Image (cartoon, helix red, strand yellow):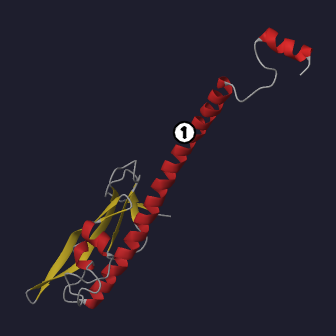
Amino acid sequence: MNRKTLSACNRTGRSVTPNGFTLMELLIVIAVILILMLMAMKTIGSMRIRANEVSAINSLRVITQAEIEYDSTYPANGFACDLKDLGGVPGSGLPTPSGAQLLDNDLASSGFKAGYNFKVSNCEKVTVNGTDRITGYQLTAVPAAPGKTGNRGFCTDQFGGNPKYDPTGGANCTQSLQ
């Protein structure tokens, strides 16, 4: 090292070559990363809600198909008025009207999937030869936490077709899905 360089270092009290990032540079980088993370969280949350809603609509279609199959398999009973009747553990024995094994047992036993609660209600029945036969029902899927797990509630009935929805997240479905 020559004398001029050495004396320049001694006068300023610092070395001439930088040895890393300054504290200010690191704080700016951290601030930028935090801002990007905050922007991404809103997007991720809305994508999760949308995915839960699509899952709920598909689950309504699967349950409706299971109801149609239940009605054709057990014509004396008609439709099932409880999700548990559509469920059952495959391989645990032969299907019965109280455990038809037509629907995934997790959904059938809990009535919950992907942030939505599913329920069969408003069952219409007729009595034929002393046996009740379910001729109609309403199937609902409402978010467990409206605004967090889903924004809209969905409904369908024994006629199937496109489910209707409630924009407030309830079971008062009046608007058709497009």
- Circle 1 packing at 10 Å, graded few (<14), some (14-19), many (20+), is few
**Residue 24 position in % (x across, y down):** 66, 23
Q: Name the outermost residue toward the left.
A: 130
Which residue is found at the position 19% from the left and 81% from the top?
A: 98
Based on the displayed image, in which of its 4 quarters is residue 143 positioned?
bottom left
Residue 35 vertical placement versus 3 (above, below) = below
Nearer to me, 100 or 151: 100
Assign the N terminus to one quadrant of the image.
top right
Q: Residue at x 61, y 33 (%)?
A: 30
Q: Position of residue 142 (x, y in %)?
A: 33, 58
Which residue position holds label 1?
Answer: 38
Tell me what residue is drawn at x 30 percent, y 68 percent: 139
Residue 11 in view, yes or no = yes
Q: Is residue 160 above or below residue 54?
A: below
Residue 47 vs residue 27, the one in the foreground: 27
At numbered mark 1, what does the secondary structure look like: helix, strand or loop? Answer: helix
Q: Amino acid at mark 1?
A: Leu
**Residue 163 to residue 43: above or below:** below
